[in-house]
Each structure stands twice: as C-alpha cells, then as structure tokens.
Amino acid sequence: MPRAIRLLLPITVLALVGSSCGGDDEGVSIYEPWARPTAAAQDTGAVYFTIVAAEEDSLIGVSVSSGVAGSAALHETSMDEAGVMMMSMVPDIEVPADGEVVFAPGGFHVMMRDLVEPLLDGASFEMTLVFAQAGDITVEVDVRDQ
Amino acid sequence: MRFSHRGALSVRRWITIALGVGLVMVACGGSGGYVPAGIVRSPAPDVSGVSLLDVASGNDFAFQAEPGGLLVVFWGYTSCPDVCPTTLADLRRAMRDMGESAEVIDVAMVTIDPNRDTPEVLAAFVQVFFPDGRAIRTEDAAALAAAAVPFGASYEVTANPDGLVDVAHTGFLYAIDENGLIRLTWPFGTNSDDIRLDLESLLKEGNNA
C-alpha cells in the first residue's frame, strides 16, 4: 500500500502497550503541543498535540486567550471516498484508560478562528484543554514549522 | 455567491489503478522501474488550455512548466487551518531537501474561495510558503468550475446562516510538465520525502526525454 494512502487512514485512538510513557501514573498528560506559523492574511490556525491518559477521560472543551484568537474548537478533518476533505466540529473526544489520542495534520486538531495576530515562528501561547475528569489543563503551545 | 464543483473523477479509481500498476511491476521483477508515490493518471490530463488569472499580472496564467522544469499546482483556500498549510509545508520541505535542483520547479495555488481570498490575502498566503509562488484567482464561478474539470479538483464553499463558511475540497497537489500535462497527482498526506523522490524522478525523466 503506498505510504500516502496509509497516512490517509484516520488517526484514531491507539492503545499503548505497556505503560512506559513517562507521564504521571494517573490523570492526563499533553505532549508536544504545536501550531504552524501563519501568514498575516490568515484568519485561522490549528494546534496539534498528543493526549496520554492513565485513566479513561473525555476531552470536552478548549480555549485560548482572547489575545490569540476569537475562538477555539475541537475539529476533525475527514476525507470521503472521492478524496474530498472536510472539517467538522467534534463535541468531545474519548481517551481510553492507558491510551492516547493524537492530534495531527489531517485528523483531530484545535481550530482557532479570528486570529488576533499572526502566529510567528518561535513564539508560544497558552491553550487550556478541558477534560471531564481531569479538569482544566493549560499548556504552552510552540509555534514552529512542523 | 456559492462556489462549487463536484468532480466526476473518482480518486479511489486512480488509487486502484496506481496500486494495480505497482503490483504488476513488482510481479514482473520490477527491475529499474520507479514506482511513484503520486498517482499516475492515464491519459495524462492536459491543463494547458485552462484559463485563470494570475493575480500579480492580471493576465491568464499558463499552466505549463518552464522547459525542463515542473509546475506544482495546489487548489485550496487560505482560511484552511489544517489541510492547506500542511500540504504546502510538505511541498516546501520536499523542495528544500532537493536543494538547487528545485530551482526549476514553480508553484501556484488556485483559490476555491475567491470571496474571502482577495488577491492580497491569497498572494500573502502563498508567498509565506513560496516567495516566488503564483496566486491564481477568478471571481467567475463558471470559469473556476471549468478549470477544475481537467484537474479533477472538486470543491464546495457554503456560507451558513450563522455566518460561518463550510468548505469541502480535494486536497491534491498536481505536478505539471512543460506541455501542460499532469504527470503526477499527490493525495493529501503524501510524505515530503515521497514528494521529493517523485519530483526528482520526473525531472530526470524530462532531461532524458
């Protein structure tokens, strides 16, 4: 199967074998949050990261400072059989116990609308993810190329 | 105004054909034959007759590469946070990794959302990724739909009552030769190394032809 096609497969929940992820023994950890730099003309941006959870939880919301963007929401990009891509808002995302969920290009992402200023390479900003069990988790998002 | 064009071409069919060709080559020993990651469509679609405007000059853009070079075209829109920047960043990485040999490759982006993508917005977006990249735009919905046909691009831009705009679109990159033929079509998510190898192979083929 061409690598390109494999990459098109939905990025979904991956069960972890073992528990060697180095995070906390309990709760939820967020790894490597990043966003691509944007052009002055762009009004939207996306944030990617990996969620690792020791116990089952559910991501139910997201916010960024009003100094960064007008709004932020959980989104998923999907592709139909004709190769047409579209984005849809997702109300919540389940994270299984001892599992992880990857937010990556072409799949889950945090969509920011109405960016106040362009996201500049090397800058960073705060984003708060809201989990049903673990509550609010605020992380620093790095702006970088990939 | 609503911009939409639903292509009749099935990508799954191209993929099936590409897979089939690959399997046949493997079955026959596959010695020497380069199997691209991109999709080879047969016959190669001819986009030399496509008529859309280059926002920099205001004139028709020629969908043809310079002799011996390649033109890579992307159809997208700038309010696209995920697919479009990812695709252009992957192409940029592929071309950076090629070094000087990428100097004969030109890049152009056609907007499917001319209502929001003004000439200034579109040009600024393209040039973040490619300083010499061309911004291609028309406000004539019929002309855009006609141009999409030979590419096999499809798109639908719908303004909702709540003020948000929904966009569905194909996220392909197209490699076009000096005759205006689409030599390869890369689906969204093609790895930048695979794009680079495909570009290098196309340039080599062109030089030996």
Image (spheres, rainbow, N blue to C red):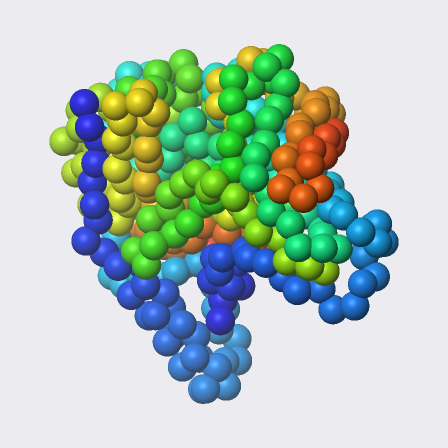
Residue drawn at point x = 42 percent, y = 17 percent: B121
Whether B108 is drawn above or below A82: the answer is: above
Residue drawn at point x = 44 percent, y = 58 percent: B38
Q: Please give the count of numbered marks on the rendered protein.
A: 0
Q: Residue reaching furthest left?
A: B142
Q: Of A50 and B126, which appears nearest the observer?
A: A50
Q: In the image, B13: left or right of A124?
A: left
State whether residue A117 appears in this view.
Answer: yes
Whether B70 is drawn above or below A143: the answer is: below
Q: In the image, B149: left or right of A81?
A: left
Residue drawn at point x = 63 percent, y = 18 percent: A65
Q: Quadrant of the N terminus of chain B?
A: top left
Q: Position of residue B191 (x, y in %)?
A: 56, 54
Q: Position of residue B37 (x, y in %)?
A: 48, 61
Q: Quadrant of residue A89?
A: top left
Q: Of B96 and A123, which appears nearest the observer?
A: A123
Q: Quadrant of residue B120?
A: top left
Q: Position of residue B197 (x, y in %)?
A: 56, 57
Residue drawn at point x = 43 percent, y = 79 percent: B23
Q: Of B176 and B11, which appears nearest the observer?
A: B11
State whether residue B172 appears in this view.
Answer: no
Q: Position of residue A20 (x, y in %)?
A: 83, 61
Q: Quadrant of the C terminus of chain B?
A: bottom left
Q: Residue reaching furthest front?
A: A133
Q: In the image, A40: left or right of A127?
A: left
